[in-house]
Image (cartoon, coloured by chain):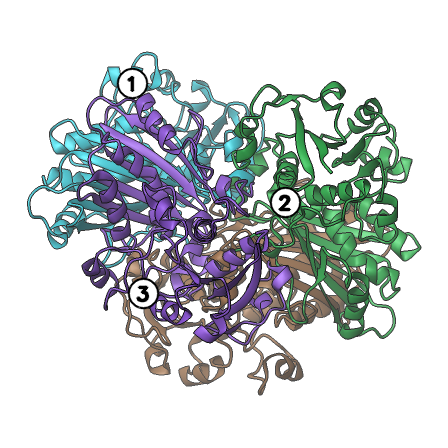
Chain colours: A purple, B cyan, C brown, D green
Amino acid sequence: MTVRVAVAGASGYAGGELLRLLLAHPEVEIGALTAGGNAGSKLGQHHPNLLPLADRELTETTAEQLRGHDVVFLALPHGHSAAIAAELGEDVVVVDCGADHRLNDAEDWTRWYGGDHPGTWPYGVPELPGARDRLRGAKRVAVAGCFPTVSSLAVVPALAAGIVEPDVVVTAITGTSGAGRALKPHLLSAEVMGSASVYGVGGAHRHTPEMIQNLSAAAGEKAKVSFTPVLAPMARGILATCSAPLRGGVDSAAARKVYLDAYGDEPFVHVLPEGAWPQTSATLGANTVHLQVTVDPDAGRLVVVGAEDNLTKGTAGGAVQCMNLALGLPETTGLPTAGLAP
Amino acid sequence: MTVRVAVAGASGYAGGELLRLLLAHPEVEIGALTAGGNAGSKLGQHHPNLLPLADRELTETTAEQLRGHDVVFLALPHGHSAAIAAELGEDVVVVDCGADHRLNDAEDWTRWYGGDHPGTWPYGVPELPGARDRLRGAKRVAVAGCFPTVSSLAVVPALAAGIVEPDVVVTAITGTSGAGRALKPHLLSAEVMGSASVYGVGGAHRHTPEMIQNLSAAAGEKAKVSFTPVLAPMARGILATCSAPLRGGVDSAAARKVYLDAYGDEPFVHVLPEGAWPQTSATLGANTVHLQVTVDPDAGRLVVVGAEDNLTKGTAGGAVQCMNLALGLPETTGLPTAGLAP
Amino acid sequence: MTVRVAVAGASGYAGGELLRLLLAHPEVEIGALTAGGNAGSKLGQHHPNLLPLADRELTETTAEQLRGHDVVFLALPHGHSAAIAAELGEDVVVVDCGADHRLNDAEDWTRWYGGDHPGTWPYGVPELPGARDRLRGAKRVAVAGCFPTVSSLAVVPALAAGIVEPDVVVTAITGTSGAGRALKPHLLSAEVMGSASVYGVGGAHRHTPEMIQNLSAAAGEKAKVSFTPVLAPMARGILATCSAPLRGGVDSAAARKVYLDAYGDEPFVHVLPEGAWPQTSATLGANTVHLQVTVDPDAGRLVVVGAEDNLTKGTAGGAVQCMNLALGLPETTGLPTAGLAP
Amino acid sequence: MTVRVAVAGASGYAGGELLRLLLAHPEVEIGALTAGGNAGSKLGQHHPNLLPLADRELTETTAEQLRGHDVVFLALPHGHSAAIAAELGEDVVVVDCGADHRLNDAEDWTRWYGGDHPGTWPYGVPELPGARDRLRGAKRVAVAGCFPTVSSLAVVPALAAGIVEPDVVVTAITGTSGAGRALKPHLLSAEVMGSASVYGVGGAHRHTPEMIQNLSAAAGEKAKVSFTPVLAPMARGILATCSAPLRGGVDSAAARKVYLDAYGDEPFVHVLPEGAWPQTSATLGANTVHLQVTVDPDAGRLVVVGAEDNLTKGTAGGAVQCMNLALGLPETTGLPTAGLAP
């Protein structure tokens, strides 16, 4: 099987990571690479790491350029996916790395992003309850946000098992590639190196409603989520520290069992051995989430920590995993589980 | 006034930061510098940054070496302070940067550190309610832990004002100097750079009882604290993200007022202008804590974020501030409020 | 003595570091703070580390705003200093942190910067032969470039003593604050962290003619300089590795003596003890250069390595040192020699 | 073809990178994993990134454990390879990542490493003149040092073409993983982050004789090499800045042609497009060297800059490339050319 793939938004970080993974995918042939302002330039100018594609020219992001492929990945600013997908037709698998089709609720969309709701597509975290079935054979996929991917995988089993209240606190430390390649003063290296900072505090980050949606679905009732993202001096990686009030007399062993039951058969979500805790370096460039869980009896809370690479499992790897499901390929095809460390 | 000062444990990070600050203190003359295994070597081998003291020889940490000074700073592993202080006599100001005399409760001490409780000394965060009075003229000072300093300053006003429940979640991102100069594999640069990791999860970090003590005092009842420390790839700095369930109808403006009232006159604790959030780089090398506070109405929580330099306000700067109070000097003498950035 | 000082370009990195140092200067009162595009905003928005000046408003960079001060520091893009200085009059001490008045040769200026030569002012590295005399009482000062400061201090003694050929190779590793606050893609944190890169290779960096000028003056003949700047993932610091072919039978001890003779009495330039080599962290925030020298007999070269903080001794600290000389103050007034480490 | 492979020294950084690459190698089955002090522990404790091997137990590094494999990789401290290889017999392909068999000259060995010369094996940089032929079908391979790999590839073409004098200056910036996992104070993260430092200055680094050997072979006469290694705050990557005096009237275009001729057909050594310069991030985790070259007419020098990942092309990737040649597999089998960036 040879799958012809196009990538829209190829000059950004998500686009680059998609291409890095697709180069190693045995069933994929890389077709059109498109961009906005960078159209006309060569890919090597933007991603000198992608040697095999260095001389490929970026063309304009238009439906015309993207047509004629089996799969089209969209790594675009939000608000553009629906129109392009409509033009591509229903036979093409469209995998949207943007936010446009993640939220179920039209009011949520309008509150957080403004404008009309572009609609909802199957949500791209196969390990969440029920998600895999919706992704198999799908023609449209909404890749999850990087924070919601790891945070939801960290908290959902406890909520689904009913061992915690749906009142969750998440502080997630992220590398700066998650902010993309935009030229913003606070992303300058001299500002970031040697410093930790917060942003979007108090429920202001757009990934909040996506987390609430996932956690509420698992809890069977509306979940509260207090989410604080922290910018740390590293290029990649998210470490999500999550906690919620315990229900009943759950101890660490029982909590661990809930997670082992949930993820024991998952190829990409890994509950670490007892006593080991996640570190983002172990997931760099891999399509994995590493988890550990414990109970703090004094505080009366369950604490779960998850690590992922925001660009891999958190974006591009998750996208390729969903493509595999959409195409009926083995889900793990072409996806690394060994991270780059140290 | 010339204050003759000795530093025990001068070859470590806390000792080095003490000396950096004391070099700039107009009333201080630096006397004996002592060490354990590094006794006999020159200070410049351990702290090449401290040029004016490069040729000073480190002597053994004994009461004999430390006697004859007006102030003795102890930057030693826990368990050694009480005996040395007893030998120094009651006229010498002893400022202990270690944990030995921070906890009020003997059982807490035994649970967290083992052995018999070495006793309780005035607690070295002058900005906490009542603390300044106990520190003025004191002959013994227990410098606070780096995490409890910033976390307590971040949460105490809300608890004291009764606007939150005493059920607090703290995730604090720290640079690796907080772990000291011990040769541990997980502190190797190749492990740390490009990675975030957690440790002491689930209430296992020894700073937890110290936080509970401070927050309970402010709340007037036993507080619960879920504390998660995160190691980030930076040498210095702590960013503490703290939250607690709101009581009643407090909004962000009212919450901000509580903090402005608490810290408006403080020289070292600064509530940032509305819309600005703390970053650790702004506090590097300064004896400051930067704070911001907001309300997350959907989550029903107050969120407070604080930044400090763990070695300065979190250890050595706090220690010098306490020395100033103990000696009757103006509290701000010799202490920088401008950080080194970028 | 109270010296009233203005800073033009206060929102940039050089301006911020000037203010950090001036806040600690006992004879200085900080007056007007001006900016270009940032005029009208508060200093705290750009330098949250400068707490004592957080509420000061930035005004437009005009002669009118800068008049009425004893000293005016210019931290502006090149090409603007001559006109402003002319408007300020000859009684004001003008210290230019830009490149405008560093080069002696008008043709050099035109080749490297374009346009007409703005003239030459006393060169701001007091430790170079003859420089201190020209700076004492000067009304105009051309602060040296960050690379030429440390590189010249590293190589000049050997050239002046005639122990090497004037054919010098310099590779200098720098933190990214040296590039200023400009929003350039290659300065984004995700690009810089975890990576080393070169720029201005092959004699293309504008600091090259300045180095050639300094080294030629010391050699008494035209020097050749092969200069390669390397961008490393750190905010501050320059480590310059310099080498040149040995003349005659000089060994390491003799070479060291040349450097000890040259700098033994200097308060800010420090030849490290034998066996110790410079590291940039030891100079952070300090007005110091750390040097070490050795002979490689197999390669037939002298190797000298120097470290400095590009923003301190390499820019703002050097500027304040020159101000002290210009005003007849003790040269070391207000300038730290202890760096911030770790 | 299934090649059964053992790795001795699996718990170190070189061993971990070997395993990361071997996991992705289509012809390899990973057999025994051995260690020294870490024998008895699980691989996952040392390399949490290597999820698929997390539960594999490390056994003692003995010939008995290593026997019965087609290929044995040795990632051991120097001095151990000869004895183990002798015990394994001549049919097994032994790929030594250590220094034992790199040097041709027995006196060089004794001067730099002490003791008797363990002998010389085919040198593991296939792209050097003549090397590939010696590696094809070899039963013993001496993987090159990380610094000599990139530095030799950067300079050899110019020497072989006779366009420069054999009098070379190399300053190479390296990440700290090159120092291995040893617990040394200067490798602690708080020391490294935010700082650049030098070591082994003046020809004291053990990779110097290896460079001299490679460059002399290319020049056809004894080459002089002045080598300065710089430690930068990054985990991986080497950026080598190299220069040598030009012979005759070579300009940048002619110099570039020399390099394009030398490497135009090489799959792993890439001369960047004109105007682009190497950055280590573009090679992270890839078996590639990126090069650029220019002429500095004022300095009369050729300047070549090369980037590699010290653990990949500089160690483990080079080792796998040599294994492919030794086994008669296509040279590029299983080796990535796309780096992990940002």
B290 w.r.t. A167: above or below: below
**Residue A98, x across and y down, in percent:** 37, 60
Q: Mark 3 against mark 2, which lies toward the viewer?
A: 3
**Residue D110, x across and y down, in percent:** 86, 33
Q: Secondary structure under badge 2?
A: loop
Chain hosting mark 1: B
Q: Secondary structure under badge 1?
A: helix
Residue located 15% across and 50% down the image: B297
**How far, Cα to Cα, is label 3 from label 2?**
38 Å
**Residue B38, x across and y down, in percent:** 55, 26
* Other residues around mark 3 within 10 Å, as few (<14) / some (14–19) / many (≥20): many
Residue located 46% across and 85% down the image: C83
Residue located 78% across and 61% down the image: D265
C106 to the left or right of A8: right
- Three-letter amino acid code at the position of disc 1: Trp
D281 w.r.t. D21: above or below: below
Q: Secondary structure under badge 3?
A: helix
- Three-letter amino acid code at the position of disc 3: Leu
Where does label 2 land, which residue? C272
D83 w.r.t. B234: above or below: above
Please state which of residues C243 and C338 is positioned toward the viewer in this rendering: C243
Regarding residue B173, the answer to whether it shows in the image is yes
Where does label 3 land, which residue? C43
To the question of a shared chain for discs 3 and 1, the answer is no
* Other residues around mark 1 within 10 Å, as few (<14) / some (14–19) / many (≥20): many
Where does label 1 land, which residue? B109
Q: Earlier in the sequence, mark 3 or mark 2?
A: 3
Please state which of residues D12 and B272 is positioned toward the viewer in this rendering: D12
